[in-house]
Amino acid sequence: MTDSLDRPHEAVLAARHSDPSVSRTARLLHAGRSKVAKKFGEEAFEVVIDALNGSRDALVRESADLLYHLVVLWVAAGISPKDVWRETDRRERLFGIAEKLGKRHDSKERRRLAAAALRKARRA
């Protein structure tokens, strides 16, 4: 998966200094992070709508748009895919893959569980 987002990340980095009149990516980045974030939110909403409507093909298309806009947002914020992978790895070591503490736990309980998970990860 890392290569799947590294390639568009490199392309967005290369396009950020292009002429905004000919590059959609440069135009988005030139508009600023808040505009990029708004566009990302719009794409996320479209993904949700297509997921609820059950259209597989539309969901695939909108998911590709969402990933593109996520990468543009990362560039606007100075984030690289490696930053995200490091955080993903950290969470996996602490809590296991694709898991996070539920919101039903109060913050004191979450800290206690996180500390216990960290101790466990250090022993492993």
Image (cartoon, rainbow, N blue to C red):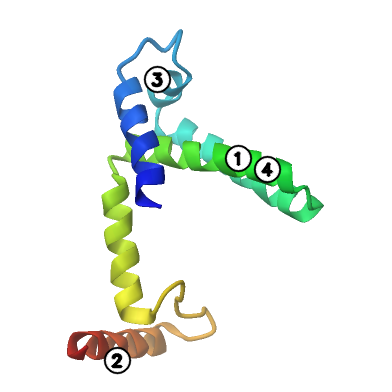
* Residue sticking out furthest to the right: 53
Residue placed most toward the observer, 30 or 80:
80
Provide the residue designation for mark 4.
46
Are the residues tagged 4 and 1 within 8 Å (C-beta)? yes
Mark toward the start of the polypeptide (1 vs 3): 3
Provide the residue designation for mark 3.
26
Question: Compared with residue 70, is residue 106 higher up or lower down, i.e. above or below?
Answer: below
Provide the residue designation for mark 1.
43
Mark toward the start of the polypeptide (4 vs 3): 3
At 40% from the left edge and 90% from the top edge, which residue is drawn? 109
Question: Compared with residue 69, is residue 102 higher up or lower down, i.e. above or below?
Answer: below
What is the x, y in percent for residue 103? 52, 78
Q: Which mark is residue 116?
A: 2
Q: Measure the C-alpha gap from mark 1 to mark 3.
A: 18 Å
Q: What kind of residue is marked 2?
A: Ala
Q: What kind of residue is marked 3?
A: Ala
